[in-house]
Amino acid sequence: MVTNIEISGYSEDALDALVRAGIYSNKTEAVREAIRRFIDSFDMKEISFRAYKEGKISFQLATEISGLSIEELIWFFLKKGFAPEIGISDINELKENLDEIGKYEAFVFDLSSSYTILELDKIDTIKKVNKRLIIGKETGKSIRSLVMRYSKIRGSLVYLGNYEQAQLKTQLSEFARKNGITLQEAEAINIAKKEKWLLISDDVRTRQIARSKGVNCVPTLSIFLYEKNQNLISEKEFNEISMKMGIIPMLVPSEIFR
């Protein structure tokens, strides 16, 4: 994206002086350096924390702004005494529309849910529902390092699926900006809505926005609960998964452990 900046008066004279002094080769280079230093003067972790705490952005956008990984930002928030809404705490939401999960042809994963199944090492378990596992192109870019790490551990390449939307990036970017979410989230929501697939997201804000747009979505734990109810995994395995999610740490309904 190209941004035009108009500079005049003292600022332009100062830039000219810096170029003439040989500090910079041209004014464009000087402006870029000035902007970089200006941005570096901000603590992006604190900015992302404040914006998220005030309900302005999703957790996934907070990770993008902060420059931290999901895991790093979770712990950063916890150290500040604030638990991010990643996962699911409401047992009723966990069970909501559980019986309808089987009717969907495919599951669309955003960054948060992709992170969850990779960290849990449960892609094979998810595949037991015999559904297509879809990630958009933008999400695929974001989880590349996670996929490579997981593949290295497993000794095989992980492939969730891929779905590219052409000619939509501008519209998706605007939708993301208006709703305080990332381009990846906007893409996942759009794919699920267009194809009438089920969106899987562990970001509470993402699920709220998706539902407001008529998109059906559930947290990752709902898929594992569905598998337990369908006898695809045992109750013991489901409980172990729930405990691991709590260790990540993510929100998990306390009723599960009673």
Image (cartoon, rainbow, N blue to C red):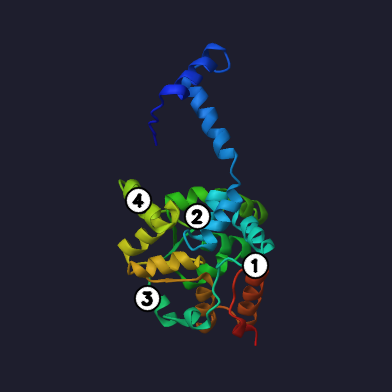
The quarter of the picture where the C terminus appears is bottom right
Dot 1 alpha-carbon crowd within 10 angstroms: few under 14, some 14 to 19, many 20 or more: some
Q: Is residue 256 left or right of residue 162?
A: right
| Structural distance between the alpha carbons of marks 3 and 2 | 31 Å
Q: Which one is earlier in the sequence, the residue at label 4 or at label 1?
A: 4
Q: Which one is earlier in the sequence, the residue at label 1 or at label 2?
A: 2
| Structural distance between the alpha carbons of marks 1 and 2 | 18 Å
Where is residue 72? Give x, y as percent.
65, 55
Mark 3 residue element: helix
Q: Nearer the viewer, mark 3 or mark 2?
A: 2
Amino acid residing under circle 1: Pro
Q: Which one is earlier in the sequence, the residue at label 2 or at label 4?
A: 2
Which numbered disc covers residue 174? 4
Residue at mark 2: 61
Q: Nearer the viewer, mark 1 or mark 3?
A: 1
Q: Is residue 237 visible?
A: yes
Identify which residue, 19 or 12, lies in the foreground.
Answer: 12
Amino acid residing under circle 4: Glu
Name which quarter of the figure residue 73 lies in. bottom right
Which numbered disc covers residue 249? 1
Which numbered disc covers residue 103? 3
Name which quarter of the figure residue 192 lies in. bottom left
Vertical comparison of 190 with 214: above or below: above
Mark 1 residue element: loop
Where is residue 214? Give x, y as percent.
32, 69
Mark 4 residue element: helix
Q: Is residue 112 left or right of residue 75?
A: left
Q: Kindly identify the residue that appears in the image at 65 percent across and 72 percent down.
A: 246
